[in-house]
Image (cartoon, rainbow, N blue to C red):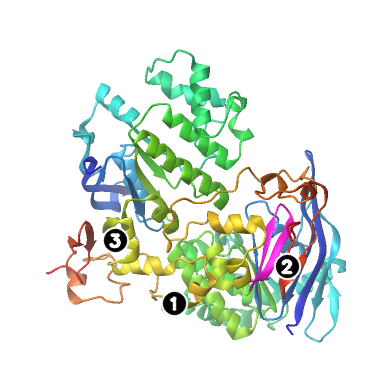
Amino acid sequence: MSEPILKVENLKKYFPIRGLLRTVGYVKAVDGVSFEINKGETFGLVGESGCGKTTTGRTILRLIEPTDGNITFEGKDVTRLKGEEMKWFRRKAQIMFQDPYSSLNPRQTVFEIIMEPVRFHGIEVDDPEEFVIKLLESVGLNEMHLYRYPHEFSGGQRQRIALARLLALKPEFIVLDEPTSALDVSVQATILNMMKELQREHGFTYLFISHDLGVVKYMSHRMGVMYLGKLVEVGPADKVFENPLHPYTKFLLSAIPVPDPELARELKKQRMKVEGEPPSPINPPAGCRFHPRCPFVKDVCRREEPPLVEVEKDHYVACWLYAKS
Amino acid sequence: MPEPILEVRDLTVHFYTYAGIVKAIEKVSFDVYKGETFALVGETGCGKSVTSRALTQLIESPGRIVGGKVIYHRDDGSTVDLLRLKEEEIREIRGKEIAYIFQDPHASLDPLYTVGYQIAEAMVVHGTVKDWKEGFKRAVDILRRVLIPDPESRVKNYPHELSGGMKQRVVIGIGVSNNPRILIADEPTTALDVTVQAQILDLMNKLKEEYKTTVILITHNMGVVAEMADRVAVMYAGKIVEIGSVDQIFKNPLHPYTQGLLKAVPNPLARIEKLETIPGTVPNLITPPSGCRFHPRCPRVMGICKEEVPKLKEMEPGHFVACHLY
């Protein structure tokens, strides 16, 4: 459980902003992110819109080419993979998207949707129909659904089909990019439980990206909090929730509406007040990126970027309140 | 004794589609009291938005309000059935005495007009200001009230120049511009990030206290309900299954659907080993299940549930449930 299957070091992704004739600037979507994911664990990545969590997920899979940084998967440098090795990586590392309405081809039947990647990767299957039925059953669907089209399914069922499709390739690492954000809570609960079950059964490693802190807490062993392209805190999910260190994490946690009216009344009184909204990642603030909104801001925060330091076992934070300058 | 401001009785809305008649809401009844925040909760397609829109006849073809009454208690003590008013008459009330805030701030604002113009327009149309000039002046005050920094220059901005959270503040500003007696907020924070959501919910609470507005909040987020509501109605497949105070609903949920819904929410402050799920899916409302509409998914289903539609019964003061278990 302790061996990292994926290592991300100083990952950067800058998107150029093109003017009339030349590049006039960069959107620094991901700006120096490092973390490791151990085999068989779920690493949760949380943050608000535009913090770079989705770009991080996609860059790791090289669906977007990174600007800089190293990605190591099972000892191989992903940024340099080519040909057969890249094809191996494409099979071992999968992604599940947020929107179950656009991630399935509306002109293909469920059978075709699931068999296409299997054929592409040249995986030998004795009886394709039986193979697909088995997969459908593992996600709570059945042979009745084999020759139906995506429009005949609800959102939750489509996410099941997307799950069955990636299971067909026997991956080891799966990026789950807001897989239940488009679903109702009762459906979400079913899908989350199923993903946990499948992890136990097959030993999958997950990178779970979400803006919903309750969902991340439920799913993750360890987690990272992103703000404006940077990881501000990394640690075991329980510790981050019980003892949040970074002011942004505290702010984020205190902003969640709690489904308990009595507790909500209590918490409302002590809610952290932070004004404004995240600034643009085109010209991020110097020093610590949270400093213009931070209630504990010091001089050093405006000048220097805080390093990620270990405050308690496995619990890291990038904040000058904890680091020595 | 709380004073009702709205009494909804047997409200029924059907949509006449090619596939058949969608019975979106069926005999929905509830009271809303003066000055409270009343939440309508439920999952996609349960009819909560349709209910909120039907209150002021905001139902477009192919939908039609088939039956029911919405008794509105006016400021002068008289009452009026909103569903019997003519289009011109209801327009006098809608946007002035009963205002709406919708989910998507991008769609609620017209991209071709400045935000100041759009706030002023709401007041000019309802005659709460004497001319456009005064309207623009008041728009600056309203932007200040919804805590938009630098309102004097923001008033000249177009919607695309504002962030999502700022736009929703403008939409709230338009909603409260005529000091409405009832504010209907349909998923006002669903399109926003949690930290922005917290700011907007704070703002709504502040405005509510300041102006003694009654708020009807439509949401699927149980956390938002716990934080905002005084009373809650839970809807399922076009029916209200349970009504009670926020503490009654969360501490002592009676309907198996409410119980299931609460247990399916991943609470970030609790350690949860396994989330409970509600088996099955939401029924098709063209041919809804007989009897109790929840019976095909109910873990405690009995024979009578398939045959008879359960009525709302008062179990403790103010706590009603529609279930044959009780």
- Chain identity of mark 2: B
Q: Where is residue A65 in the image (x, y as percent from the top left)?
A: 29, 39
Q: In which quarter of the image is residue B242?
A: bottom right
Question: Label 3 vs label 2: CA separation?
Answer: 55 Å
- Residue A184 can be seen, yes or no: no
Circle 3: element type: loop
Magenta region: B231-246
Q: How crowded is mark 2: few (under 14 residues within 10 Å), some or many (20 or more)?
A: many
Q: Quadrant of residue A217?
A: bottom left
Circle 1: element type: loop
Give the dominant element type of the magenta stretch: helix, strand or loop.
strand
Question: Label 1 vs label 2: CA separation?
Answer: 44 Å
* Quadrant of the image containing the C terminus of chain A: bottom left
Q: Mark 2 points at which residue?
A: B320
Q: How crowded is mark 3: few (under 14 residues within 10 Å), some or many (20 or more)?
A: few
Residue B240 sits inside the magenta stretch: yes
Q: Is residue A299 left or right of residue B196?
A: left
Check disc 1 and give the amino acid type: Pro
Q: Mark 3 points at which residue?
A: A283
- In percent of the image, x 18 and y 34: which residue is there? A75
Residue nearest the observer in this picture, B135 or A300: A300
- Chain identity of mark 3: A
- Residue B12 can be seen, yes or no: yes
Q: Position of residue B271 (x, y in %)?
A: 41, 59
- Chain identity of mark 1: B
Residue nearest the observer in this picture, B271 or B265: B271
Question: Label 3 vs label 1: CA separation?
Answer: 21 Å
Q: Residues within 10 Å of mark 1 (few under 14, many from 20)?
A: few
Tell me, for residue B149, which label it has, or none.
1
Check disc 3 and give the amino acid type: Asn
